[in-house]
Amino acid sequence: MGKYQLDYKGQLAVTKFHEKQTPAKVDKKKQLEKMRAEYLKNKQNKTDK
């Protein structure tokens, strides 16, 4: 056994900690869809005026 070997519960705690620390991955497709929808909405608003 290693000096710092963790049991199952400890391993889960470490995994959970690291998941919180990593920045959220940006999904480019979702981001592009959001930007496109925003653009079309703004364009529609301008043509309505």
Image: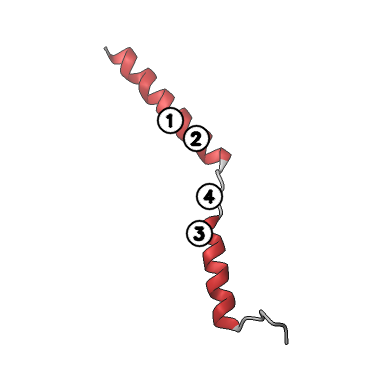
Q: Which residue is mark 2?
A: 33
Q: Are marks 1 and 4 in contact (CB under 8 Å)?
A: no
Foreground residue among 28 and 14: 14
Quarter holding residue 4: bottom right
Q: Nearer the viewer, mark 4 or mark 2?
A: 4
Q: How far from the left and from the top, in percent, is residue 13?
A: 53, 73
Q: Which residue is mark 4?
A: 24
Q: Are marks 2 and 1 in contact (CB under 8 Å)?
A: yes
Q: Amino acid at mark 3?
A: Lys
Label ID, residue 20: 3
Q: How far from the left and from the top, in percent, is residue 9?
A: 54, 81
Q: Amino acid at mark 1?
A: Ala
Q: Are marks 4 and 2 in contact (CB under 8 Å)?
A: no
Identified at 54% across, 61% down, the residue is 19
Quarter holding residue 8: bottom right
Q: Nearer the viewer, mark 3 or mark 1?
A: 3
Q: CA distance from mark 2 to mark 3?
A: 26 Å
Q: Which residue is mark 1?
A: 37
Instruction: Choose the circle earlier in sequence order: 3 or 1.
Output: 3
